[in-house]
Each structure stands twice: as C-alpha cells, then as structure tokens.
Image: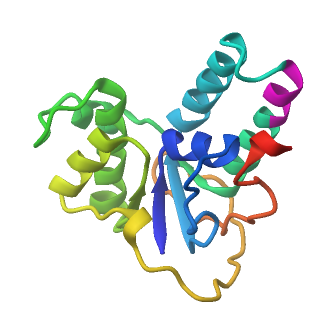
Amino acid sequence: MTVYLDSTLVIRQLVGTKNPWPGWGAWDAAYASALMRTECYRTANLLRLSGKLDDEQRARLGTWIERVCKSVTIVPVTDGVLQRAADAFPTAVGTVQAIHLATLLELKSVHDITCLVATADDELLRAAESMGFSDALKAPLKSDPEPASKESAPTESAPKKAASKDKDDAPADAASK
C-alpha cells in the first residue's frame, strides 16, 4: 500500500493512542508534505509546554519524528502546490489541510502516484475522500509486508518511492517509554 502520512496520525502513533493504527509501518511506500516535520515539532513543543511531556520525553519524541521523516518520501511544497491549495475544494478545509490536499493531487497528476490517506484529521479525510482518495486506516493490511529499499528524498520535480517504515524505529506507544 502507498500512503500519504499526515502529522496528526504520526504524532498519535509516536506519543501513543488507545487505538494505534495496525498498518503503521506496513506500507510499501509512504509520502508526506514537507510540512509534516514542522507540524510534528510544533505539536511536540506544545505538548512539552503544556506539561504533557517532560524535556526527556520531548527529546525522545524529536528523535522519533526524525526517524519517521527519514523513512518517508518528503514532497516539497512547490509553487504549484501552493497555487492549487489556494483554489476551491469540495469541502471546507483550512490552509494547512489545503496544502496537504494539493500535495496529494500533485502526486497523482504529475507523478502518477495515488496514495491512501493516513490521517487522524476528520476534515482532511472527508475532503480527500470527496476527491477520490481512500482512507489508509480502513485499507486491508498485507499479512506479511516485505521491506522495500530506501531511496533518496524527492527533488521538487520528481518524488521517488520511499522505504517501508520499520516498526521498531518508532514505537506506537511512546508514552510508556
């Protein structure tokens, strides 16, 4: 399965959730907007400042965020993505959600890569589904995923397929560590 990861799901997987996604790391290829790293770090910093994480936990979360970012193909936020994000979408979305949707559209139209959307953001998922994308969290899982080889990050013109995410690299329940 080829997925597009959104920071809402990444943070929930890394910090821990009552219902972790069983498909975490079982993808053949994973893509994410260059925004994902910033969104994850902003959330990690907010969790620390609100007292939900101590400094040690925040540092560990930062390490896990970097592991996730290195294991997926990061898609640059190009002028084309920003121009498309400024256009209308079938449902109401905010600016960051529009950039994620425009990135999905660019992957599909320019690079012929159709991703399943892996997000915990209901509004983003609703908009993506209204545009023909499917929910990765509801997709059937392979019984025994095969690891893929890792390739370099994309250039602005051509994203490349990413390696599978190793489940051991980022625990699904970081809060217990």
Q: Can residue 71 be seen in this view?
A: yes
Q: Is residue 146 above or below residue 3?
A: below
Q: Which colour scheme is used?
A: rainbow
Range drawn in magenta: 55-60
Q: In which quadrant will I find the C terminus?
A: top right
Question: Most extreme residue toward the front, as rendered?
Answer: 18
Going 59% across and 88% down the picture, which residue do you hit? 143
Q: Is the magenta stretch mostly helix, strand or loop?
A: helix
Name the residue at 55% across, 61% down.
21
Residue 13, percent from left and from top: 62, 49
Left or right relative to 164: residue 96: left
Residue appearing at x 10%, y 43% in the figure:
90
Residue 58 on the magenta segment? yes
Q: Nearer the viewer, residue 20 or 104?
A: 20
Q: In this view, does 118 lie above or below 77?
A: below
> Relative to residue 91, is residue 77 drawn left or right?
right
Q: Can residue 33 be seen in this view?
A: no
Tell which of 66 and 52 is nearer to you.
52
Which residue lies at the image location 67% right of the left edge and 85% below the top edge? 146
User: In this orientation, which residue lies closer to the viewer: 24 or 29?
Assistant: 24
Q: In which quarter of the image is residue 80?
A: top left
Which image quarter: residue 162? bottom right
